[in-house]
Amino acid sequence: MTVVKDKFVEYGREPDFRDAAAAVRRSAGDNAGPLLQRLAAITFKPEAVVGRRIPNALAFMRRHGFRPVAYRRIRLDQRRARALWRFQWNVATTDRLAVADLLMPACDSLWVAFWDETTPLAIPGTVRFRSLKGPAYPSVRKEGQLRYELGGTNRMMTFIHAADEPIDLIRELGTLFAPEIRPTLARDLSVGEGVDATENLQRCLSALHTDVPSQDLDIDAVMCRLDTLITHRLAHAPSSELHAVRATLMRARDGQALNWAALQREFGQAELDLPLWDRIQIGAQYIRHDRENAVCTIDEDGRSGWLSGRGTVLPLQQARPLEVNEPDAPAKIVGVTVVDVAAGRLQPGMTLHLKDGRLTPDGWGKNSGSSAGSERLVIDGSDHFLCPGLYDGHVHHQSEDDALYLANGVTHVRNMWGGEHSLARAASNHAAAWGPRLVTTSPVIDGPADSQASTWPGVVTCQSKGDGVSAATKLADAGYHILKIYGNLSRAMMTEVCQVAEERNLLVVGHCPGSLTFEEAAGLGLSCIEHLENVERGHLLPEYALSLGSLGRRSRQLGPAQTAVEALRLRNNGIDWAALDRMADELASAGTAVCPTLSVYRMMFQDPEAALRDPALKYLARHRIQQWHPRHDFRLRDLVPVWPEIVALSRQRLENYMEIVALLHSRGVQIIAGTDAPNPYLVPGFSLHQELSLLVQAGLSPLDALRCATTVPAERFGLGPTRRGSGASRGFLLVDANPMQSLRTLRTPRGLVVNGDYLGQHALTELLDDRTRVSAEVSQ
């Protein structure tokens, strides 16, 4: 782990280091050493966050063969910062420590672990990155080094901190993260070989940028602003204190070391209250950083030792699967009542055989009997029911939510915004990872953006003739079997997409384009309509349709908030139910399904204080919940002045939508249960139970609602590639009561079979407990 003797001695004296090392050993076992040699880690410091340098750094890492596998937001408070750099900061001046105390906790930082994909590995990933990152001193950085690309004019604001050897990575786990989170993070690292966290990392980074305003990190601009301010103040009120500040800064510019404590006093006497980042930049640029004749406690980074062959690179063994502690895996479940959801009947007294944690096809149809003595564990299922695992038909999947899905009995999800990572996950379904099986759509295909709400990253935009063919063909060639369209797509472009889909035997799903009615979209080939917004188009009474059309001409006068209120009121009150009857028949005739996502209308549009009372929110980090407030969501912030009216009108809209769902279902239109998690206040896994409850409130029977979350999406979208025969692809829940009579029993499964593995109640509880610990740590 190191070629530096001092590190071995000094780190070994730290309890947090020993605890972190033990966590890695427990997770990775004998593979811990080779695993750590494959990893590198970067802490993106506050200046990288406010200066928006992280996207360029991530692109740099990808170009050089480093794949992100884990990440965490952290706050470098004084304790963490001084512990992290204590073997170097023993030489720091008091001025350097004072400025660091301003810089490090100025905002959240971002810690990212990377997998070194180099083959064969000649030196550890940490050591290889040590050569790539560049020195702290700007004057000696070279082109091609990360710090050179990121810029910077002083040795304090260097944008990144990185582990120099594998042993430093262990120490960072102990120094930066609380004991409760270290085991989870160690498990994330132990499966890093098969993980690409890029997609979720980008979401985390986007949230971080939303929470933290950007800053122009330009010391020349800072000094120019300060000069202008002082000149202006002197012109109106001559002051010896202001002259003293100007003289101090002039000496600093001429190369004389700045006395930071003295400058702070002069600022106070001159009543100059500079913004935080201006003060940080001045201090970092002009102070003396090191005490004279002082030497760092540990001054060797080890790179030369590794390059000279003093260190040993260990071979990486086959990665071990992520483990959830369950005392015993069952050999069979006997006497259980199997719920045949498709047929709507029960099959009592059945025996389910499990072999190596996988379902065996010959296990079905055998009557229960006494167990063989050689089998490890037999579960008496005589008082239990076995039903299909739940399928959330509309999510935006993030790997960090996998535990929440499983703990709620969700064994399959349809990811509605695909990318390279989700496509790879769907192809392999991560046989060694605990998580629901994944079916994914393509990235969104849309027309030109007509509003801020439609400018999502990663959208494939169609603007002219032939773009629909090109986009659909490219995504089909990439391996996507389901194409997703969005609301700005024109009729012509949608026709092109659907024609390619028909030729390539693909499904087209998505939002009904704003220029089309539901039945028009179905006629063009839309297989499943996501959400119910725009359902009113073509289905409003004439006078209301006319008023809605004229509203656009008055929108500038009314403003965005009042325009939204009026539009929602007209849509709510003007529904032509006879027209909707005809629409339902046409959708059924076309074979088009609808995924209404009632829960997103219920949860997203509510009073934020009421939303925060949901006990399931304890499983999510605070920063994630905070960004859901309407004033932080760019789609909703214009509506904040009229939010109470929006909430009231949204309740009325939800009631209309539930009636529409009942109408569609009665006419034979397939309904898909989906939630749109994790949109505001939709907690993954838990939100599917809310959706099922709303479907029952809409008039569906518990059995019909259960089909919407099991057999219907499975038949329409599939279960994903199988691992070993047809049985291995399915998920099952062991529950206490008959779910065809009451869906409440699904909320607390006794056991679960997913990806060929069995998780008992102990394991499912542990998943939730672990999420509680992680969310508490991330929220600190």
Image: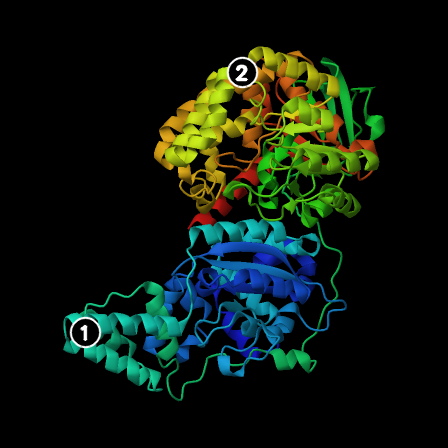
At 57% from the left edge and 52% from the top edge, which residue is drawn? 202
Q: Quick one: 747 or 183, which is closer to the camera? A: 747
Q: Residue furthest bottom?
A: 293
Amino acid bearing label 1: Leu
The number of discs equals 2
At 50% from the left edge and 47% from the top edge, which residue is drawn? 774
Residue annotated with mark 2? 697
Q: Quick one: 768 or 242, which is closer to the camera? A: 242
Quadrant of res 415: top right
The answer to whether the residue labelled 1 contacts the one labelled 2, judged by CB atoms less than 8 Å apart, is no
Residue 462, given in percent of the width and then of the height, sits at 67, 44
Quadrant of res 678: top right
Residue 418, given in percent of the width and then of the height, sits at 67, 43
Q: How is the image coloured?
A: rainbow
Tell me how far mark 1 sits from mark 2, CA to CA.
71 Å
Q: Is residue 448 visible?
A: yes
Q: Depth-wise, is mark 1 or mark 2 nearer the camera?
A: 1
Residue 110, given in percent of the width and then of the height, sits at 50, 58
The disc label shown at residue 61, or none: none
Residue annotated with mark 1? 234
Choose the circle earlier in sequence order: 1 or 2: 1
Q: Is residue 376 visible?
A: no
Amino acid bearing label 2: Gln
Q: Is residue 627 left or right of residue 6?
A: left
Secondary structure category for the residue under label 2? helix
Q: Count neighbours of disc 2 (C-alpha within 10 A) and say few if under 14, some if 14 to 19, many if 20 or more.
A: some
